[in-house]
């Protein structure tokens, strides 16, 4: 019996800790980008009226200080990586009008959750732009991400299904049980 304790204990630890994989795919960054945009196009069917913005256009607006990024992901995801100067959804909702003079760009891993949020806000009369392809497209198009220590090469990709980070980046995602502990549906 004693021999089974260690493997079971380690198995439980593996499922409880977020998984991390470096470069788990043999795909090129160009192939990953194509997959990310194809996935986003399929998700877009769930919020067809939402305005998209291309990552390169968003980068240009950010460089000119004409954009504000709103991250709709969970705090655990944001702790790993965020877009430059992004704010949380909670912070945005405290007073959306304070950003009336800027283009408001929402995002998440691939921009499904942010697309649904933009759709919800549109019903309330607030126009948001959804970052096409989300955080994944952003880095695949050459954008940078940050954590509390500065620029980062880690990206929380929510789940293995979305593990399409560029070469040189580390993908982090929720472990098996972590997903069940989240207070949202299990889809990106």
Image: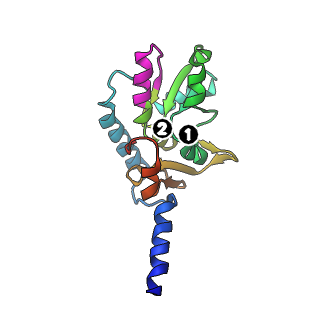
Q: Give the residue at mark 2.
A: 108
Residue under the point 49% across and 73% down: 10
Q: CA distance from mark 1 to mark 2?
A: 14 Å
Look at the image and give the residue range highlighted in magenta: 115-129
Q: Residue furthest right?
A: 149
- Left or right of residue 14: residue 153: right
Residue under the point 34% across and 21% down: 49
Q: Is residue 26 above or below residue 115?
A: below
Residue under the point 51% across and 57% down: 18
Check the image and tell me how it is coloured: rainbow
Q: Is residue 12 above or below residue 57?
A: below
Q: Is residue 116 magenta?
A: yes
Instruction: Give 177 or 155, whichever is nearer the viewer.
Output: 177
Residue 179: x and y, percent?
43, 51
Residue 28: x and y, percent?
41, 53
Magenta segment, principal secondary structure? helix
Q: Is residue 164 visible?
A: no
- Left or right of residue 146: residue 27: left
Q: Is residue 124 magenta?
A: yes
Q: Quadrant of the C terminus?
A: top left
Residue 2: x and y, percent?
47, 86
Q: Residue furthest front?
A: 1
Q: Quadrant of the N terminus?
A: bottom left
Q: Is residue 16 visible?
A: yes
* Helix, strand or loop under label 2: loop
Q: Give the residue at mark 1.
A: 143
Residue under the point 42% across and 58% down: 176
* Helix, strand or loop under label 1: loop
Instruction: Give 165 or 120, whichever is nearer the viewer.
Output: 120
Instruction: Give 54 or 181, whichever is nearer the viewer.
Output: 181
């Amino acid at each position: 019996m004693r021999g089974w304790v260690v493997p079971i204990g380690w198995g439980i630890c593996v499922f409880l800790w977020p998984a991390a994989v470096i470069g788990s795919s043999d795909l090129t960054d160009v192939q990953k980008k194509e997959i990310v945009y194809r996935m986003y196009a399929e998700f877009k069917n769930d919020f067809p009226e939402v305005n998209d913005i291309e990552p390169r256009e968003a980068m240009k607006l950010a460089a000119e200080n004409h954009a504000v990024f709103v991250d709709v992901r969970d705090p655990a995801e944001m702790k790993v990586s965020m877009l430059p100067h992004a704010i949380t959804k909670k912070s945005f909702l405290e007073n959306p009008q304070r950003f009336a003079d800027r283009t408001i760009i929402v995002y998440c891993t691939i921009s499904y959750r942010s697309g649904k949020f933009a759709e919800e806000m549109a019903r309330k009369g607030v126009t948001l732009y959804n970052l096409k392809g989300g955080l994944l497209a952003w880095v695949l198009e050459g954008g940078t991400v940050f954590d509390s220590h500065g620029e980062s090469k880690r990206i929380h990709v929510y789940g293995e299904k979305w593990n399409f980070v560029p070469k040189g980046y580390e993908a982090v995602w929720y472990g098996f049980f972590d997903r069940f502990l989240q207070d949202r549906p299990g889809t990106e």
